[in-house]
């Protein structure tokens, strides 16, 4: 299986352990990732807040770069994924704008190289046995809640997710790893990450609510597939020690892949005591 | 030429693509908004103010700047109105008309972020955060966490510059930035 790979800016910065665990897990699963040559930032939350046009043209450049290979583009970051889907929709529907972009970026849009989020690829492109057959250390005793956040599933007319209010794809993968995911009703509630630096007062309220809800559900960790959610939940919880894992870190743990100690040491809320107590 | 778009709500509809005039004020948007507690006007009130043509009030409101574009309102709206693009239009309009952003630090971060992309083609957190701190006049908040991020290797010291930066700059020039 081959995919074009758009890591996004977070992977070489605050999400470095996300990137490393993706590399390790994809290699173990036989998923070949071909990094998009000379990719640029999608503009994330900032571009659309200040300049609508820029929020469309920045991801359009990456769509132009991804197209020639004809491969789907795997994206680990929900913000990159959602912004790129949005630009793709405009390329499809707005002929005048598409022609302008084609001239400026030197390509002819043909709809190839679809943006795909990592969770979608792991959960929908692989047969279930591909995961279960690689599990060497079932994650027994790990009781995660699946946290999808906002941008991965919404707006549903762009993302086409299974259920924008209560998706279950991550739970399925966690069960395949031998974990015991628990139900909660906050899986698609926003953590407010884009206000993490400039209105941390607002964000501490949101993160506190999520962590309290996870505790109330009986969870011992939160699992995410978003670099922004991870750093926000990991650093902005107050007076609690709820470990926040990337899904790919847990896959690496269950597959017994090397290098994972180093991923976990990058966290602010130390997950090692929990793993140790469970013999993982 | 005759002016065919006369009301503020029509301008908002045209620019956002969202049918705000179909709102019947069920307030689902307000009820599901995660940041409503910090806003001066709640999402449903923002829609009502648009319908009333209260442009000056809206361009000075904190609500558009605090909206996190989580799209909860748009997903649940029975009339299919997404407020995230509407809030974006209000922010863009405030900037175009020279109204000072009602949440200065929120604006400062967005601006520093897009400046960083113009400089490198990708975001370089360290220099972006330094620009933000100068813009926000907020040097010391989270400095300890920043240092820990650098020590943990989660904020690269040196930026990565893309090869075809000229193409990204052309995208910026096109928007007049």
Image (cartoon, helix red, strand yellow):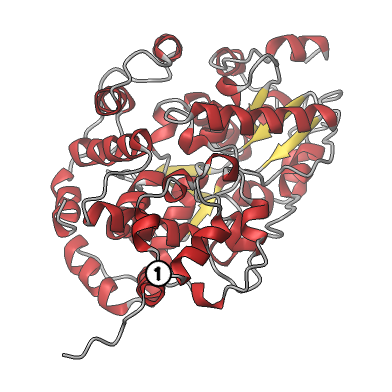
Between residue A27 and residue B52, name the one nearer to us.
B52
User: Which x, y percent locates residue B129?
Assistant: 32, 25
Asked where in the image residue A190 lies, by quadrant, the reply is top right
User: Residue visible at 50% across and 27% down?
Assistant: A200
User: Which x, y percent locates residue B76?
Assistant: 66, 63
Please count the marks in the image: 1
Element under disc 1:
loop
User: Residue visible at 44% across and 62% down?
Assistant: B86
User: Relative to B36, does residue A266 appear above or below in the rendering?
Assistant: above
Q: Taking B58 as reference, is A65 left or right?
A: left
User: Which x, y percent locates residue B155?
Assistant: 38, 20
- Kindly identify which residue carries mark 1: B53
Can residue A41 be seen? yes
User: Which x, y percent locates residue B94?
Assistant: 29, 54
Between residue A270 and residue B99, name the one nearer to us.
B99
Between residue B103 and residue A169, name the one nearer to us.
B103
Label 1 marks a residue whose chain is B
Between residue A84 and residue B54, name the one nearer to us.
B54
Q: Taking B27 as reference, is B171 left or right?
A: left
User: Relative to A191, does residue A71 appear above or below in the rendering?
Assistant: below
Question: Image quadrant for the C terminus of chain A?
Answer: top right
Can residue A155 be seen? no
Q: Taking B72 as reference, is A101 left or right?
A: left
User: Residue visible at 43% across and 56% down?
Assistant: B87
Asked where in the image residue B8 lies, by quadrant, the reply is bottom left
Tell me the crowding category of disc 1: few under 14, some 14 to 19, or many 20 or more residues within 10 angstroms, Cα based: some
Q: Residue furthest bottom?
A: B2
User: Relative to A12, does residue A99 appear above or below in the rendering?
Assistant: below
């Amino acid at each position: 299986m081959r995919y074009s790979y758009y890591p996004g800016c977070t992977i070489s910065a605050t999400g470095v352990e996300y990137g490393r665990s993706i590399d390790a897990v994809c290699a173990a699963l036989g998923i070949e990732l071909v990094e998009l040559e000379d990719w640029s930032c999608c503009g994330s939350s900032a571009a659309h807040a200040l300049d609508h046009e820029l929020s469309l043209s920045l991801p359009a450049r990456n769509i132009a770069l991804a197209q020639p290979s004809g491969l789907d583009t795997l994206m680990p970051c929900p913000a990159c994924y959602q912004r790129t889907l949005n630009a793709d929709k405009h390329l499809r529907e707005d002929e005048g704008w598409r022609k302008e972009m084609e001239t400026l970026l030197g390509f002819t849009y043909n709809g190839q190289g679809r943006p795909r989020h990592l969770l979608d690829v792991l959960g929908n492109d692989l047969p279930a046995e591909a995961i279960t057959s690689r599990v060497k250390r079932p994650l027994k005793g790990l009781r995660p809640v699946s946290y999808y956040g906002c941008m991965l599933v919404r707006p549903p007319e762009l993302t086409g997710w299974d259920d924008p209010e209560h998706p279950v794809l991550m739970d399925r993968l966690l069960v395949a790893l031998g974990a015991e995911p628990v139900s909660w009703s906050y899986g698609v509630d926003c953590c407010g990450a884009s206000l993490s630096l400039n209105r941390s007062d607002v964000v501490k309220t949101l993160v506190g609510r999520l962590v309290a809800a996870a505790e109330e559900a009986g969870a011992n960790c939160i699992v995410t597939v978003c670099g922004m959610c991870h750093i926000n939940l990991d650093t902005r919880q107050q007076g609690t020690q709820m470990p926040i894992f990337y899904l790919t870190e847990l896959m690496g743990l269950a597959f017994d892949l090397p290098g994972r100690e180093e991923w976990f040491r990058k966290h602010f809320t130390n997950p090692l005591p929990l793993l140790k107590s469970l013999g993982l | 030429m005759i002016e065919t778009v006369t009301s503020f709500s029509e301008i908002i509809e045209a620019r956002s693509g969202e049918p705000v005039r179909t709102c019947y004020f069920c307030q689902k948007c307000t009820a599901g908004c995660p940041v409503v507690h910090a806003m001066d006007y709640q999402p449903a009130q923002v829609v009502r103010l648009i319908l009333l043509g209260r442009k000056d009030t809206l361009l000075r409101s904190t609500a558009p700047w605090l909206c996190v574009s989580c799209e909860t309102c748009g997903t649940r709206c029975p009339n299919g109105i997404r407020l995230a693009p509407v809030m974006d239009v209000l922010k863009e309009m405030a900037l175009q008309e020279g109204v000072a952003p009602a949440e200065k630090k929120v604006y400062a971060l967005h601006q520093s972020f897009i400046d960083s992309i113009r400089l490198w083609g990708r975001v370089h957190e360290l220099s972006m955060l330094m620009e933000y701190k100068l813009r926000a006049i907020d040097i010391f908040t989270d400095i300890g966490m920043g240092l820990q991020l650098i020590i943990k290797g989660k904020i690269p010291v040196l930026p990565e510059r893309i090869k075809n930066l000229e193409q990204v700059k052309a995208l910026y020039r096109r928007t007049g930035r």
